[in-house]
Image (cartoon, coloured by chain):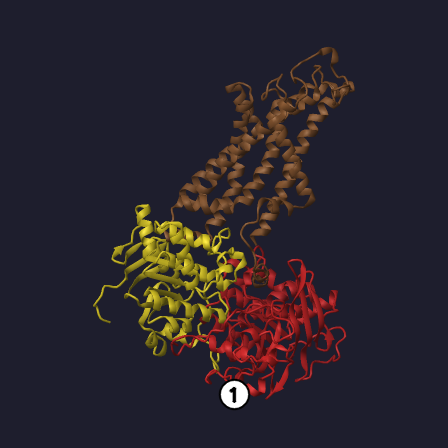
Chain colours: A brown, B yellow, C red
Amino acid sequence: MSTTAAAVSADATPRRGAFSLLKATGPVGIGAAVVIALATLVAIFGPLLAPYDPTLSDLSLSWVAPTGGHLLGFDGQGRDLLSRLLVGARTSILGPLAVVILCMLAGTVLAVTAAWRRGAVDAAISSGLDIMFAFPGILLAVLAASVFGAGLLAAAVALAIAYTPYVARVLRGAALKERSQQYVAALEVQGVSARAICMQHLVPNMLPLIVAQSTILFGYAMVDLAAISFLGLGVQPPNPDWGVMISENQAGIVQGYPLSALLPGLCIVLVVVAFNVLGERLFEQAQKARQ
Amino acid sequence: MTEAAAPVLAVAGLRKEFGELVAVDDVSFALPEAGSLAIVGESGSGKTTVAKMIVGLERPTKGTIVACGNDRSKPARSASDRRRRGREVQIVFQDPYTSLDPRQTVEATLDEILRLHHGWPKERRRERVRELTDLVGLDARQSRALPRGLSGGQRQRVAIARALAAEPRILILDESVAALDVSIQAQVLNLLADIRDETSVSFVLISHDLAVVRQLAEETIVMWRGRVVERGATGRVLDDPQDDYTKQLRASVPRPGWKPQRRSVVATEEA
Amino acid sequence: MSASRPVAGAATTAGHRPNAALLQVERLTVRLPVEGAQREVLRDVSFDIRGGEALGLVGESGSGKSMTARAIDRLLPAGAEVDGSIRFDGGEVGSLTGGDLRRYRGLVAMIFQDPRAHVNPVRRIGDFMTEALRTNLDVPRSTAERRAVHMLAQVGIEDGERRLRQYPHELSGGLLQRVMIAAALLTEPRLLLADEPTTALDVTTQAEVMAILHDLRREFDLAMLFITHDLELAAAVCDRTVVMYAGQLVEMRSAARLHDDPLHPYTAALAAARPDIGQSARRLRAIPGRPLSAFEAPQGECAFAPRCPHAVDECRTGVPELVDLDGGRSRCVRASELRGRLGVAAGD
């Protein structure tokens, strides 16, 4: 069966560019990528794009509907909603990004070390991970807040620690599989160092999985961080953050002014879904390409 | 056999235990310079374990391995030591579908090895890559291709080129043609014979296929359940086997007029 | 042996006439979806198997030999298109459904190259062996197990009761393959499709398994389609041999004569490419290029022409037909002309 496939892809040229990989994910994948790109732009340029000062409060304008130059109206504290959304994007998106980068790094290092060294080292790392599994993210964040005080950094680090065992477990399986391939043995016989093999061969071949994991985790991190901020343990008011905004404007829902609580929620959902969708399709494409 | 020159590979009293299981028991042999030796056996004979010990993928429980005058019975101590061993003994594995990094083109694969062993500038490396791909019969399109664009036979050629990029004195072929079609196998066997003529590299051929052994190897040792049961010139071992197992092996090879016999001993093998 | 139940639509009902064709494959063409398009993998394949006969099917990658067996056993992958006909005991196989199809599967059994890929690792051997008997033929479990133990003894496994309770991973490759053979024979098939059953086994185990197949075939009057890449093996254990290349049948010959007096250049080249266990050659006579699938081969001409040392212009003017020659058949326009000059002993 392999002969037919190999014969037909006989003209396979080296790694397709990122753009062609993206195109292959179809209109849905491209749509998700557009959403993510927009969100990223807003995260970077938010403060420049905001028409008004997001912290400028005028209580006489609280809950006022969209009017004049204020496209989305005002929140419960009389602040321009659109500006708060745009500026809030920064912490809402960069926060999860930091979490993902930290836990993917830690998880990859642990997984590859366990898979490469095998034996006692693998057993020790796996036991350590089992212990870490016992700590759910939010609980660790609460603990961190009580020790280091509330704030985004403590919350992000706590979440990263909580996510690391999941990452390590998933990647360990892939790393073990890759390590058992004969090309790794061939490189060992050549005398290539363990570090070079892991960094230049093992990890690159795990990239589809790493990318997929990252996008899924981004979604979780975003929701978890928003929840932590909602609880008052993450980003502190008056800083705009989508999670904080939901918390602050809860009262508005029952009073008949749902916009200021729903819109930040919608932003979160949109970005999380976009990441999940894109991640899943990229993974699919990468798997296909590997055939 | 004259003792004029020291053998390029000398294995003595080699033993490997995996817990209770003795996979290799007291195996010794010598490979002369530019010679070719076959290790014949079936599954469980220990022949692949011997090959792995020679290249350092397994560590001997007991015994010595000396290649190119250097002892390699213990693991390498430093990075430069590992690289030096890579320049002494190389190996080509059986499965063409997992022996190449799927993300590397042929040229990148070979270039990496050249960079590892030689401090040559880019132009010199590129030239050498072309020499190697010519040597194994790959054209320009194939050299730029990823493994998934190559057939099994072509991938084995790449694996051979990669092994040769280190310019080893000893090349171990671990069932390297077993997974190939008959017509492709013939091409690769001819290629290996040509390489021997051009580079004087010595071969250790691990195989269960007696016809391939006859074609490529001058000397043969037969392994069964970890021990060497027979050794000698390939022609003599195959035409006039002395050991019972070798005789049974020889008698099991299909040929016109062959009538398979059931062994009188009923199967009692465990997994 | 109990009388086999006739397949729906069969022309004969009471047993089979000794030399009538048990299996008739006629102009079988199969297309499979490969990377989006329907590509031919089998082209115009025709052959018969008589009751009790062993037919060898020899070829390399892309020859279509495995696909042929799958087509016969109705195991083609999804999206496959089949033209032509396959008739078993007179009845068309392609149109069987439901109960008839299950009965057919009892009459035509298949064993594969890698038994571990075709057996459920979490079920015991006994479950697996008796499944077909219990579900398709309504045989009570105790009877089915007794028959299984008896059949295991026939393939050389004496402690059958113990083996029935074991799991597949507890058996070696050779032992598991014997179990597969025993399992295949439990439904008293009339035809056994063996797809490279010994390729993954040691050569001594292969000899043992081939001997078992030989004995069992004689005892149960079982026909066999034996698929292999090994020309010598086919020649030794089969009555007739068919050689396939690029999805087409290129030669059909009695096994004894195939090696010494081939009728097609590909067969001769295949035999010549193999190293000789009796002596080392300066260089093997390798065939240039590589074996192709049906859809890769050049259209409108002899598929082997690009690699054939005997090719002439006539070979490229159209797809050669099968011609009868000296009791065999060959798809070579120069077959009778090259007769006697293609043998391994004779030079090019």
Question: Is A158 above or below relative to C129?
Answer: above
Q: In which quarter of the image is residue C88?
A: bottom right
User: Is residue A267 shown above or below C6?
Assistant: above
User: Horizontal and vertical percent for residue C143?
Assistant: 63, 67
Measured from the top left, where is residue C14 in percent x and y? 73, 80
Note whether B92 is above or below C304 in the view shown. above
User: At label 1, which amino acid type do we have?
Assistant: Gly
Residue A157: in sight, yes or no?
yes
Residue C104 falls left or right of residue B21: right
Nearest the camera: C68 or A191? A191
C78, C184: nearer the viewer: C78
Q: Residue at x 46, y 35 (%)?
A: A128
Q: Mark 1 lies on which chain?
A: C
- Nearer to the camera, B11 or A193: A193
- Residue C166 in view in this figure: no
**Res C28 quadrant in image:** bottom right
Residue A266 as seen in the image, left or right of residue B161: right
Residue reaching furthest left? B4
Across and down, in percent, residue B261 comes to 47, 77
Which residue corresponds to the image point at 61% horizontal and 44% vertical from the top-left? A19
In the picture of the structure, the residue carrying the numbered disc 1 is C340
**CA neighbours of label 1 inside 10 A, class few (<14), some (14 to 19), many (20+):** some
Q: Where is residue C82 in the image (x, y as percent from the top left)?
A: 70, 68
Q: The N terminus of chain B lies in which quarter of the figure?
A: bottom left
